[in-house]
Amino acid sequence: MEKMNQALERVKIMVGIEVDEEEEAADVSSSSSWSFADDFNRHCTLSTKQRIYGFAICFVAGLACTLLSLLVFFNPIKFGITFTFGNLLSLGSTAFLIGPKRQLTMMLDPARIYATAMYLASVIIALFCALYVHNKLLTLLAIILEFGALVWYSLSYIPFARAMVSKIMAACFDTEF
C-alpha cells in the first residue's frame, strides 16, 4: 500500500497537483462564494485518483473515437461527427487533471485566446457542415480546418512552438530563391 501511495504522490507532482491543493479544495467547499466559476469549481472537486481515472477514460474514449473515425473516412459526414466528438472528448479530458476553472482560464489566456476561438469555431463549422449542410466537400474542408486549428491550439501550450512552426512554414513556402 505504501508503494501505491508513493506512486500516487509522484503522479500528483507530474500532473501539477500539489498535495496541499486537495486540502485547499476542502477549505474552498466550506467557504461561501457567490462567483459562478468558484461555485462550479467547488462542485467539481475530485480526489487525485478520480481525476486520473476521469482523464484516462475520457482521453481513451476520445482517442478511440478519433481512430474509429478513420474507418468511415470516405463518408465525410460520419467522419466529421466522430472526429469532432473524439477531439472534444480529448480536450475535455484535460479538465479532469487541472479542473474546469483552470482549463477555461488557460484557454482564455491572452496568449492563446485566438487559437481557442479558431479551434472552437472550426469545431462548430465542422459539425454544421456535417449535420445540416450534408455536403461532403465542405465537411472535409471543415475537418481539415479543424485539424489545423487543433494543432495550432496545441502548439500554444508549448513555449515558442508557434513561432518555430511559423518560421519553418515561411522558410518552406518562400517563393524567393
Image: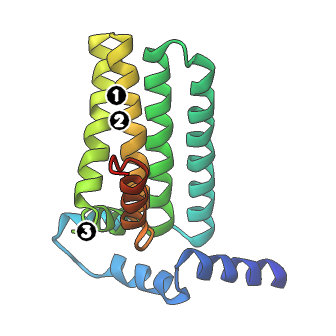
At a point 28% along the width and 23% down the height, the residue shown is 128
- The residue that label 2 is drawn on is 145
The answer to whether residue 45 is visible is no
Q: Nearer the viewer, residue 103 or 156?
A: 156
Could you tell me residue 6's position as x and y percent? Answer: 75, 84
Could you tell me residue 14's position as x and y percent? Answer: 61, 78
- The residue that label 3 is drawn on is 109
Q: Helix, strand or loop at disc 1? A: helix
Q: Helix, strand or loop at disc 2? A: helix
Camera-nearest label, 3 or 2 = 2
The answer to whether residue 15 is visible is yes
Could you tell me residue 102's position as x and y percent? Answer: 35, 69
Label 1 sits on what residue type?
Ala
Q: Residues within 10 Å of mark 2 (few under 14, many from 20)?
A: some
Whether 157 is drawn above or below 81: the answer is below
Q: Nearer the viewer, residue 113 or 28?
A: 113
